Image (tube, rainbow, N blue to C red):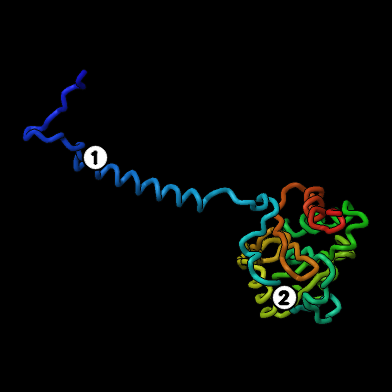
C-alpha cells in the first residue's frame, strides 16, 4: 500500500515552511522586548522584607546624629552629649506661644506619668525658637509650670538657628496686630516631638493628635525594656 502522494511545489520541490510576515515578525520582537522589560521591573519592585511603615525612620533620619550646643535654665552650657545613655524627647517652641506649646508640654508631662518607672529612661527637652525673648530664666519659669522633669534650653540666635537646621525645623516670624495682653508676633513652627536614642541618633519624629496616651505608647515601643 502506497502512502499519500507528496505535495509538490510549482517546480516539483516540497514546499518550505512559510516565513512570518513582516508585520508579524515586528509584533513578535516587540512582545519579546516587553516581556524582558516587564521581568526586569518585576525583579526591581519585588516585595522585600522591609519593616512596616510604623517602624520606618523618616527621610530626615538619614543624617548621622543630632548634635547641639545650648544653654540650660541655670545659664550653663549643655550639649547633646550630656544626655548620652538616655532617650531625649525634644520639642521646639517658645514661651509666648498661644496654643500649641502649652498643649504639647502638658501632653509631655502626662505621658511621663503614664510611662511610670520607664519614664526615667526619657529626658524631655524644650528648645526655644525665640532666643531674643526667651532667656534662661524665662524658659525655666515656663517649663516648670508643666513639669520639673522638662529641661528647658535656649541660646544665642546663631546657636538656635544651628540646632533648628540640624533637626530640619522651619520657623516663620510673623508680626500681628497689637492686642491687650498679647505679644505683637507669633512664630510658626512644627508641632513635632523628636525622639532621640541613647546614642544620639534620631529614631522617630512623632506627630500625634491622640493625646498623652498615644504619645506614651509610641515612646514605650522604642524603650528597650519593652522589647524584653
Q: Which mark is residue 67?
A: 2
Q: In this view, does 197 lie to the left or right of 187?
A: right
User: Is disc 2 placed on a helix, strand or loop?
Assistant: loop
In the rendered image, the quadrant that contains the N terminus is: top left
Q: Residue 55 carries which label?
A: none
Of residues 125 and 54, the one nearer the viewer is: 54
Name the residue nearer the viewer: 121 or 53: 53
Residue at image position (84%, 59%) is 224
What residue is disc 1 on? 24
Residue at the far front: name it.
1
Please, is residue 6 above or below residue 59 in the view?
Answer: above
Q: Which image quadrant is residue 158 in? A: bottom right
Q: Nearer the viewer, residue 14 or 180?
A: 14
Q: Where is residue 114 in the image (x, y as percent from the top left)?
A: 88, 51
Dot 1 or dot 2: first in sequence order is 1
The x and y percentages for residue 165 are 63, 72
The answer to whether residue 97 shows anywhere in this view is no
**Which residue is rendered at x = 24% and y = 43% of the image?**
25
Q: Which residue is drawn at 79% across and 76% down?
A: 81
Q: Do the residues labelled 1 and 2 touch (CB within 8 Å)?
A: no
Residue at the extreme left: 11
Q: Choose top left, top right, bottom left or bottom right for residue 56.
A: bottom right
Quadrant occupied by the C terminus: bottom right
33 up-or-down from 137: above or below: above
Q: Which image quadrant is residue 122 in?
A: bottom right
* Left or right of 203 on screen, residue 188: left
Q: What element carries label 1?
A: helix
The location of residue 200, given as percent across then percent down, is 76, 70
User: Can the viewer see residue 109 in this picture?
Assistant: yes
Inter-mark Cα distance, 1 to 2 = 65 Å
Instruction: Tell whether 87 sits left or right of 194.
Output: right
Amino acid at each position: 500500500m502506497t502512502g499519500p502522494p507528496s505535495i509538490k511545489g510549482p517546480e516539483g520541490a516540497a514546499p518550505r515552511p512559510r516565513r512570518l510576515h513582516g508585520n508579524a515578525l515586528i509584533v513578535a520582537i516587540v512582545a519579546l522586548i516587553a516581556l524582558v522589560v516587564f521581568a526586569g521591573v518585576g525583579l526591581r519592585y519585588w516585595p522585600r522584607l522591609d519593616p512596616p511603615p510604623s517602624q520606618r525612620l523618616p527621610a530626615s533620619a538619614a543624617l548621622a546624629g543630632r548634635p547641639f550646643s545650648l544653654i540650660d535654665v541655670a545659664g550653663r552650657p549643655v550639649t547633646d552629649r550630656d544626655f548620652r545613655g538616655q532617650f531625649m524627647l525634644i520639642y521646639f517652641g517658645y514661651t509666648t506661644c498661644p496654643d500649641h506649646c502649652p498643649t504639647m508640654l502638658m501632653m509631655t508631662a502626662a505621658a511621663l506619668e503614664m510611662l511610670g518607672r520607664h519614664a526615667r529612661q526619657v529626658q524631655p527637652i524644650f528648645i526655644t525658637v525665640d532666643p531674643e525673648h526667651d532667656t534662661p530664666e524665662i524658659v525655666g519659669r515656663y517649663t516648670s509650670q508643666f513639669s520639673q522633669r522638662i529641661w528647658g534650653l535656649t541660646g544665642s540666635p546663631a546657636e538656635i538657628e544651628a540646632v533648628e537646621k540640624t533637626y530640619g525645623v522651619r520657623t516663620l516670624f510673623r508680626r500681628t496686630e497689637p492686642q491687650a495682653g498679647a505679644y505683637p508676633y507669633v512664630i510658626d513652627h512644627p508641632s513635632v516631638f523628636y525622639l532621640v536614642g541613647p546614642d544620639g541618633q534620631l529614631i522617630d519624629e512623632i506627630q500625634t493628635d491622640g493625646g498623652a496616651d498615644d504619645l506614651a505608647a509610641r515612646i514605650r515601643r522604642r524603650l528597650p525594656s519593652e522589647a524584653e
